[in-house]
Amino acid sequence: MIIRFHLPSQTPRLIRRSSKPSKTPRSSLTPLPKPSLPNSDAGLLFREKIVYLENLNVNSHKALRLNPDFRAAPLDSLISVERCLSSFGIGRSSLGRILDMHPQLLTSDPQSDLYPIFDFLLNEVPVPFLDLPKSIIRCPRLLVCSVTDQLRPTLSFLRNLGFVGPNSITCQTTLLLVSSAEGTLLPKIQYLQSLGLSYEQVVNMVIRSPGLLTFSVRNNFSPKAKYFLEEMKGDIAELKRFPQYFSFSLEGKIKPRHRLLVEYGLTLPLSEMLKVSDGEFNARLIEMRLRSMDGR
């Protein structure tokens, strides 16, 4: 069949319509665009996600800034994260705080991102199921750590250190698992050794007071050790007996109490100086002053 038509300002041409289908492969064709939601519908869905975050007390501006993928994530994916965490006993109030601290969790995949972490905590650490919420609420960062690259290697390091048997990791100490063994934990042990303590003595200290491994060398160990050794003229053996010294505020408790003792020419062991309340300390101070006056 021949169709005749005129091109503008051109002589007539003959165009033959082929009866054969085009041989252009489908893969080379430009894909059809996916249908998009009207702007009003897209805006409504986005508003629903913002309201969802507000109901959880999650800062939506912070979430969008730290997790740009949240903007395109469907509401169902957010709800699936909530369902996953709630299935392990994490309440809605705690959930909001966790998601606000780590907004990347909003677009996580429970199957590939969250369940492996819960499986590790329950079966490898292991943490009893009823204690699992305590671990997560105490240290939400657990949920954004890699089991392979972070949690498992640190667990192995801690076990080699002595966190086994009655000293095994519990829901109170799972926060240690988020620290790098080589980059964070080992330098703290080495610093304590540099004070004149043996490796075995340091290990005994951190086993008795695992919180030592959460303190900063620069902001905690170093200034407190310096004050103890230089201003208090302390004996390193006393730190070995009372490693909790590093858990007290240098400016808020250690210095003020030590200076009061010095002012009145009195001394107390570290534990007696720091473990009591302010009222008890003042009462003991008065009692010691009266005794010293009676002895004159």
Image: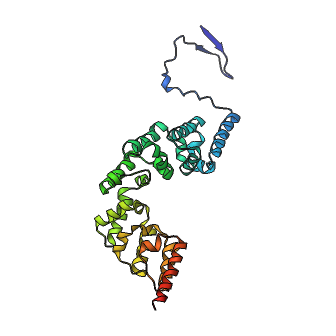
Q: Looking at the picture, does residue 24 appear above or below residue 235?
A: above
Q: Residue furthest front?
A: 294
- The quarter of the rendered structure image containing the N terminus is top right
Q: Is residue 96 above or below residue 224?
A: above
Q: How many marks?
A: 0
Percent position of residue 71, x then y: 60, 42
Taking depth in this image into account, of 191 and 125 the one nearest to the observer is: 125
**124 versus 19 height, above or below:** below
Placement of 33 over or under 292, stated as above or below: above
- Where is residue 169? Give x, y as percent: 38, 52
In the drawing, does residue 203 fall left or right of residue 145? left
Closer to the camera in the image, 223 or 273: 273
Residue at x 40% of width, y 52% of height = 177
Which residue is more in the foreground, 43 or 83? 83
Q: Give the residue at x 60% y 37%.
A: 75
Image coordinates for residue 260, horizontal then vertical, percent: 51, 81
Return the residue nearer the eye: 12 or 170.
Answer: 170
